[in-house]
């Protein structure tokens, strides 16, 4: 059962019939994705549709197009427009193919969602009714050994979602021991960060570390796998490097900060995150800009004090929404998913909010 819908952009349908409708669209999209071998099952799609509540004539932004599951769901739900952003050229190629199906209603935008304001301005979008972010990597990115995201497959130590910038190998081979320890500790939350960094630096003195297998072996030397481990001990180091390579938290902060200016009153920001570092940022931003946090110090910049007086967002759901038991049973990736939603108020935007 989908959560109650009480937002200003809710349709006139009763929550139950509306929930049934989202589930039907979600089911159709998942079946389409499966039939067309997209390789990715969109996580919490029914809930994303319920909270975005697409309406005819609306304008939505899918900041993480991926294989297009969310975008397809939104376009099927209403006669609306979707701007589809992705930094991965392979995802944008897919969006361009899909655009033919939707007669100009799907507009692919190649780039980073951290630059969403610039991308939308260049596309003359005007204010939008919804922005959704489904954070992290898509299954095709994870499954393609050549992208270097997975410790399960051997491949080049790359991990870039886009096609430019430093690779994981650049970081592993060039960062100082202290920088490596900080990355693994902060982004991987691995308590063995110092030992791992030391071992990486020792290993690269013999030969550059260029493959996922080499890095996995180094981590396993420090943190051997044994029967008691439910997850691979290399998971955290790989997550840390991926976050660093793609500046994932900086991207998220920039997109959150851009949202108040982009959304029209009643428009919604929906974020699906997969680890606590992401969710903590979304939570903090939502609380800060929905008046649920203590007023900022009188020494804070004036614009912050004005925003605290008149919140930019309300929170239709106070906490996170998790995937249903049925979804987590069918798709293990959904287990760690947390959805948060905020709705833009009429409060004037003074500019310069911080994530
Ligand atoms: C989890 S997948 C999204 C899946 C999508 N919801 C679907 O139904 O297919 C995340 C996608 O977001 C993209 N991505 C991640 N961070 C990005 C960023 N900062 N800017 C643009 N795209 C990003 C990735 O390249 C990937 O294609």
Image (tube, rainbow, N blue to C red):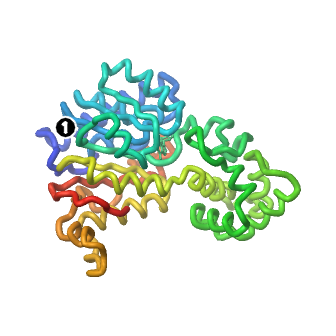
Answer whether residue 230 is visible to the viewer in this image: yes
Disc 1 crowd, CA 10 A, few/some/many (<14, 14-19, 20+): few
| Residue 28 x, y percent position in the rendering | 36, 27
353 relative to 221 in the view: left or right: left
Query: Eyeballing the image, is 219 above or below 332?
Result: below
| Residue 301 x, y percent position in the rendering | 29, 73
Quadrant where the image shows the C terminus: bottom left
Residue lying at 57% horizontally and 62% vertically, measured from the top left: 187
Residue lying at 56% horizontally and 42% vertically, measured from the top left: 161
The residue to which callout 1 is attached is: 17
Query: Eyeballing the image, is 244 above or below 100?
Result: below
Q: Nearer the viewer, residue 161 or 141?
A: 161
Residue lying at 67% horizontally and 59% vertically, measured from the top left: 229
Q: Nearer the viewer, residue 261 or 96?
A: 261
Residue lying at 77% horizontally and 67% vertically, measured from the top left: 198
336 relative to 265 in the view: left or right: right
Query: Eyeballing the image, is 255 above or below 129?
Result: below
Answer whether residue 20 is visible to the viewer in this image: no
| Residue 109 x, y percent position in the rendering | 41, 34
Question: For residue 201, which quarter of the picture?
Answer: bottom right
Badge 1 marks a residue whose secondary structure is helix
Question: For residue 69, which quarter of the picture?
Answer: top left
Extreme residue in the right direction: 206
């Amino acid at each position: 059962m989908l959560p109650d819908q009480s937002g200003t952009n809710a349709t006139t349908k009763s929550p139950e019939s509306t929930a049934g409708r989202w589930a039907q669209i979600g089911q159709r999209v998942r079946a389409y994705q499966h039939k067309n071998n997209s390789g990715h099952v969109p996580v919490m799609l029914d809930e994303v549709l319920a909270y975005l509540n697409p309406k005819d004539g609306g304008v939505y932004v899918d900041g993480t197009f991926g294989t297009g599951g969310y975008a397809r769901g939104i376009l099927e739900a209403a006669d609306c427009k979707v701007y589809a952003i992705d930094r991965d050229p392979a995802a944008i190629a897919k969006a361009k193919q899909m655009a033919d199906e939707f007669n100009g209603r799907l507009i692919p935008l190649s780039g980073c969602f951290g630059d969403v304001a610039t991308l939308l301005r260049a596309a003359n979008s005007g204010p939008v009714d919804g922005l959704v972010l489904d954070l992290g990597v898509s299954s095709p990115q994870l499954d393609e050994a050549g992208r270097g995201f997975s410790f399960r497959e051997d491949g080049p130590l790359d991990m870039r979602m886009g096609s430019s910038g430093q690779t994981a190998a650049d970081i592993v081979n060039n960062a100082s021991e202290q920088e490596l320890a900080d990355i693994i500790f902060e982004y991987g939350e691995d308590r063995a960060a110092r030992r791992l960094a030391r071992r990486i630096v020792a290993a690269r003195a013999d030969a550059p570390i260029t493959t996922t297998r080499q890095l996995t072996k180094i981590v396993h030397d420090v943190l051997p796998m044994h029967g008691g481990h439910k997850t691979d001990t290399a998971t955290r180091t790989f997550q840390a490097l991926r976050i660093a390579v793609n500046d994932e938290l900086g991207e998220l902060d920039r997109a959150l900060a851009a949202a108040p200016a982009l959304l029209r009153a009643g428009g919604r920001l929906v974020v699906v995150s997969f680890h606590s570092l992401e969710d903590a940022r979304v939570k903090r931003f939502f609380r800060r800009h929905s008046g649920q946090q203590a007023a900022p110090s009188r020494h804070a910049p004036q614009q912050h004090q004005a925003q605290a007086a008149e919140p930019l967002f309300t929170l239709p759901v106070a906490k996170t929404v998790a995937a249903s038991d049925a979804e987590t049973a069918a798709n293990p990736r959904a287990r760690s998913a947390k959805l948060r939603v905020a709705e833009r108020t009429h409060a004037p935007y003074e500019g310069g909010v911080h994530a």
